[in-house]
Amino acid sequence: MEIIKLQARERDGAGKSYTRKARASGWIPAVYYGHDREPKKIEVPHKEFATVVRGRKTTHLFDLGLGGDSIAVIREIQRRVLKDTDFFHLDFMHVDMNEKWSWKCRSNLRASQSASRTITAYWGTRSKS
């Protein structure tokens, strides 16, 4: 899988006035967090991130360039409703490339009568019990 590089930087300020100034100067406020790590307030360049969104690559892995191991995925994108290229805030979640994950997923399958006919036609006749 491709790892996209973003030149993020840590930010010192917080609050409404700081984030408005950051957006006006071409940076998107964001937070970088993960398992067993303190959350970091960061900023991402708007032009680079808009290129990623236009390329439909928001599900890829990102190297934030913060030094050390800063591989992350996008957890949440807050954007303006009517204008898709204005971003308010981003959440990046840390990904440990050496950690294995497994999970159980429960699924319920329901079929209508027409779906069961299609399945019967494909798989052959079924026995009624």
Image: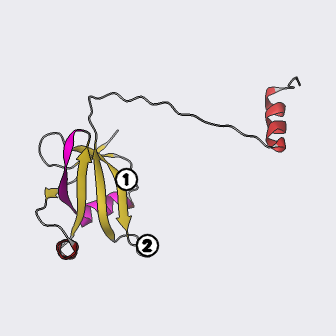
Mark whose residue sits in front, 1 or 2: 2
Task: Give the crowd class for mark 1: few <14, some 14-19, many >=20 residues within 10 Å.
Answer: some
Task: Tell me the element at label 2.
Answer: loop
Question: Who's the residue at 40% across and 70% down the image?
Answer: 84
Give residue 113's position: percent from left, percent from top.
84, 42
**Viewer-closest of 80 and 1:** 80
Give how far apart the Cα atoms at labels 1 and 2 are.
18 Å
Name the residue at 23% across, 64% down: 29
Name the quarter where the N terminus is drawn. top left
Q: Is residue 25 left or right of residue 107?
A: left
- Tag 2: Cα neighbours inside 10 Å, few (<14), some, or many (≥20)? few
Contact (CB < 8 A) between labels 1 and 2?
Answer: no
Q: Residue at x 38, y 57 (%)?
A: 55
The secondary element bearing badge 1 is classed as loop
Vertical comparison of 70 with 104: above or below: below
Is 31 displayed left or right of 13 in the figure? right
Quadrant occupied by the C terminus? top right
Determine which residue is flagged by label 2: 81
The answer to whether residue 50 is magenta is yes
Q: Position of residue 124 (x, y in %)?
A: 84, 26
Query: Which residue is depicted at the point 27% across and 33% down?
Result: 97
Residue 17, percent from left and from top:
19, 76
Q: Which residue is mark 1?
A: 58
Quick check: 62 above or below 79? Answer: above
Residue 42 inside the magenta-drawn segment: yes
Let me know if residue 5 appears in the view: no
Task: Return the residue nearer the eye: 86 or 53.
Answer: 86
Q: Which region of the structure is painted magenta?
A: 36-53
In the image, what residue type sits under mark 2? Val
